[in-house]
Image: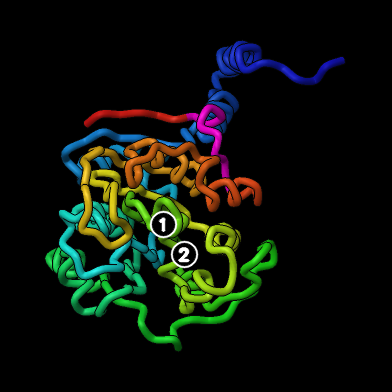
Amino acid sequence: MDDKISRRQFLKSATGVAIATGSISILASYLQAQESQEKPDLVVVKTTAPEKGIISAIEAIGGISRFVKTGDVVMIKPNIAFPNPPEWGSTTSPEIVVAVVKLCLDAGAKSVLVIDHPMGRSDQCLQRTGIASACEKLGSDKVKVSAAMEQRDYVEVKLEKAKALEKTEVHKLVMRANTFINIPVAKSHSATTVSLGMKNLMGLIWDRAYLHQKIDLHQGIADLCTFIKPSLIIMDGTKALATKGPEGPGMTVKPDTIIAGTDQVAVDSYTLGLSTWNGKAYNPGDVKHISNAHALQIGEMNLDKLKIKKLEV
C-alpha cells in the first residue's frame, strides 16, 4: 500500500479530523510546514525607494526574524572597496546598508558590525562611500562601521571542499557572528567579468593577491564560497556599474532592483541579467566562478529551477 498522500488529500482528511475533534493543531502544523517549504528562492523587487524595497524583499523572503534573533551579533558586508561616491555604482548604496541595519536592530540584534577590507585608504573609503556617516546618523551604539585592515583580526582556515584555494586567512567575525548578511553591489569587473555577491566575499580575507596571482581567480572565488556562507544575500541593483569596473568611473545604469536570497549562486546568476557588462550580455554558465560554484554544489545557477517572487514597490 502506498503511504504517500497528496497535499489535497491531507488537507481534506485533516480538516475532517479538526471538525470532528474541535482541534485545529494538526492542520495548523501542516500548513506552517508547507509555508516554510514554499518560501521563494529569490525575491526580486523593482523600486525607486530603496528602504521600502528592502523591507518588501526581506518580508517576502521570510522576514528579518528568519535570520536575526534577539541578542544576535550580526555581521554585514557591503562593498566599501573604493573611496568613491555612491553615484558611481562601485560601492554599495548607503541607503541599502542603513535599511538592513535598521531591520536588524528592530529584530533585537545585540550588535551590528558593518565591515569590509577596502582597496583604498580606509578612512576615505568609509567616508566617501557615505556608508559610515549614514550609519552614524542612526545614533545607535550597537552599530559599528569598520575597515578590516589589521592582520591580527584574521585567522587561517582550511577549505576542505576547495579545488584550488586550500587555505586562507578569514576575518574572525565570519566564525563569531550569529548572522552574516552579504550586501554586494552589481558591477562589471576587468578580471572576472562581474563583481557580485560571491566576489564580494574577497573583502573578508587577508591575502587577496594570492587569488589573483597564484591560483585561478574564478576557482578561488568559488572555493571561498565553500567556507564563507552568508545567511542572507541582498544584491544592490539599484545602480550598476556596467563598464570600467570594479572601480570606475564608468557607465552607470539604473536597474532599480533589489534581489534577496539565501543561495549565493542563484543571486549572482539572476543579477547577470540586470545589465550588459562591458558591452556584452552573459548567461550564468559564461562566468567561470558562477559555473564553478554551481559545480561545487554551492548553489543553483539554472534560473528555471528556482522559485522567484517578483514585486514592485
- Figure check: 85 above or below 44: below
Amino acid marked by disc 1: Lys
Residue 170 appears in the figure: yes
At which x and y percent is residue 78? 32, 61
Amino acid marked by disc 2: Asn
Between 274 and 59, which is closer to the camera in this rendering?
274
Q: Residue furthest right?
A: 1
At which x and y percent is residue 35? 50, 30
Q: Residues within 10 Å of mark 1 (few under 14, many from 20)?
A: some
Q: Main SS type for the magenta part?
A: loop
Residue annotated with mark 2: 178
The residue tagged with tag 1: helix, strand or loop?
Answer: loop
Q: Residues within 10 Å of mark 2 (few under 14, many from 20)?
A: some
- Residue at the spot 39% in from the left edge and 41% down from the top edge: 271
Q: Are marks 2 and 1 in contact (CB under 8 Å)?
A: yes
Q: Is residue 8 left or right of residue 199?
A: right
Between 109 and 138, which is closer to the camera in this rendering?
138
